[in-house]
Image (cartoon, rainbow, N blue to C red):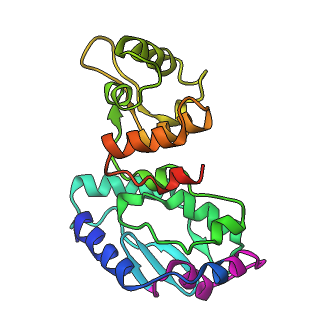
Amino acid sequence: MSPQTLAAKLRTIAATHEPTSATRASEIAGMERFGVLEFLELTGIELGSYGIYKVDNDGVRLALSADDLTFTGHERIDLRKACDKLRNLDFPCSPEEFCDWYETTLGENRVSDFPLATGFLTALGRRLPPRATSGIAPVPSTKIMEAFQVKPGTVRNRLWWSERMRSAKKYGLLNARASQGGRGRGKPSYWHSIVIAVWLIEKNHLTKDKVIHAVSSHFPECDTDYLQDI
């Protein structure tokens, strides 16, 4: 089954099952440890296989083998990468262990993200990382500069961004950089637009409304709900 088919299957599952209420999610967040039933309540799924994962009474495991010859070369590479960073979840687990696992596995092949009941992370004083809401490919630096007008005028804005992108560590932008550019024209660096958006808001470089408008206009595939809570 191709990643595209798996993604479609997961969307169908998500559309037919709903996570539990915010009130119940908060109750689960207050438990010292919880098991498979609470996991199913939080995610709104049933026992079974979802994308590259299998959920059973003992926990969540990677269900597919990277050595399966029915997969293409690219698919096997993706699965090996998933294995490298995979954190299995054992039941029973603490709410914090669940959160750590959930954050680590988000975006795995873009087919195995589970929904999560509203209120659970809030009760724990946590929120999803930006990568959980992006779901899009990184974009070149020129597109970031075009989308987010921090300084008036194209030249001033480009100079402002160039300084910060060249010194990403100094300005706290390393997490936003997907890949570093090469020398010369035509080899730009690539950036995660939604992480850039979070940085702009948190550093007060642009108002939240302006950032959300820019993301909606230039990166319509991004979900801006995450930005509302910053």
Image location (x, y in percent) of residue 77: 32, 52
Inspect this view and state whether residue 13 appears.
yes
Image location (x, y in percent) of residue 194: 45, 43
Q: Quadrant of residue 3?
A: bottom left
Q: Is residue 155 above or below residue 66?
A: above
Q: Is residue 34 above or below residue 138?
A: below
Residue, x 37% and y 11% (percent of image)?
Answer: 155
Q: Horizontal placement of 39 versus 165: left or right? A: right
Q: Horizontal placement of 95 versus 69: left or right? A: right
Q: Quadrant of residue 141?
A: top left
Magenta region, residue range: 26-47
Q: How many marks?
A: 0
Image location (x, y in percent) of residue 12: 30, 79
Inspect this view and state whether residue 91 appears.
no
Q: Quadrant of residue 172?
A: top right
Say which quadrant the N terminus sits in: bottom left
Q: Nearer the viewer, residue 179 or 29?
A: 29
Residue 35 within the magenta-colored segment of the rendering: yes
Residue, x 60% and y 48% (percent of image)?
Answer: 230
Q: Horizontal placement of 26 versus 70: left or right? A: right
Q: Nearer the viewer, residue 211 or 93?
A: 211
Q: Nearer the viewer, residue 178 or 18?
A: 18
Q: Nearer the viewer, residue 86 or 131?
A: 131
Residue, x 72% and y 65% (percent of image)?
Answer: 124
Residue, x 46% and y 71% (percent of image)?
Answer: 114
Image location (x, y in percent) of residue 97: 67, 66
Q: Is residue 58 above or below residue 72?
A: below
Q: Is residue 104 above or below residue 193?
A: below
